[in-house]
Amino acid sequence: MPVQISPSVLASDFANLQSEIEMLNASACDYIHVDIMDGVFVPNISFGIPVTEAMHKHAQKPLDVHLMIVNPDNYLEAFAKAGASIISVHVEACNHLHRSLQAIKALGCKAGIAVNPHTPISSFEEVIQDIDLVCIMSVNPGFGGQKFIENTYDKVRRLKDLILRKNAQTLIEIDGGVNLVNAPLLMEAGADVLVAGSFVFNSSNPIKTIQELKSL
Ligand code: DX5
Ligand code: ZN
């Protein structure tokens, strides 16, 4: 399967969100990555449910919603209603991960988890068959434009091994510092979906940059 691209609107021009979404509609991207930050789980605040809903009105690609928030269970229904297709909760924010995954699926969404750089694969190994997507954080969540953490390649390889061993259908997504240099190495390690924020939106031609990532 060709690599899937999920540009993060965190790096887009928030004063022109409609035209940014229309640009993504016209691009080769597969999803639109929506970064929700609450100022508690991560040291930054982005935007929330009404903005997600507003983007969904214009989006022709599925919304890939990354919840960097505490108590994510309390907001799953609201994000599903706002138009999320995939909802990823942080492993570190869930006391009952299996229950959260079932709750996401019951809302008709794909169930994802996101994993901080220091969190081991073993922390979700027992529920891998229930997970549609694992978002491996390749930076500490909270900000766009950070440096890619090199240990990610090895972590992706170990996750891919687990998925194959358990015969799971889980997709591997990489989030943070993705560019044209590390993308081919990530794909080789087993990545299925690449999130790219600043690399796409800070480029002179985002549509072309998305195409370049997509055709790797
Ligand atoms: C980090 C976010 C990422 C971020 C990626 O907290 O989860 O999705 O926007 O941005 P870049 O690609 O600039 O690292
Ligand atoms: Zn993200």
Image: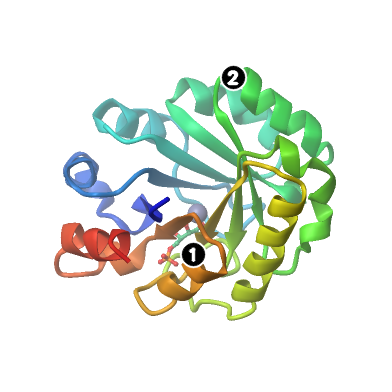
User: Which amino acid, mark 2?
Assistant: Leu
In terms of image quadrants, where is residue 99?
A: top right
Residue labelled 1 has its Cβ within 8 Å of some atom of ligand 1:
yes
User: Which amino acid, mark 1?
Assistant: Phe
User: In the rendered structure, which disc, 2 or 1, sits on the residue that comes first in sequence?
Assistant: 2
User: Depth check: 136 or 164 in front?
Assistant: 164
Residue appearing at x 28%, y 26% in the figure: 57
Frontmost of labels 2 and 1 is 2
Residue appearing at x 60%, y 68% in the figure: 140
Residue appearing at x 15%, y 69% in the figure: 204
Residue that mark 1 sits on = 143
On the image, the x and y values in percent for residue 148 come to 51, 76
> Left or right of 88: which side holds 180?
left
Question: Relative to residue 16, is residue 186 depicted above or below?
Answer: below
Residue that mark 2 sits on = 107
> Left or right of 102: which side holds 134?
left
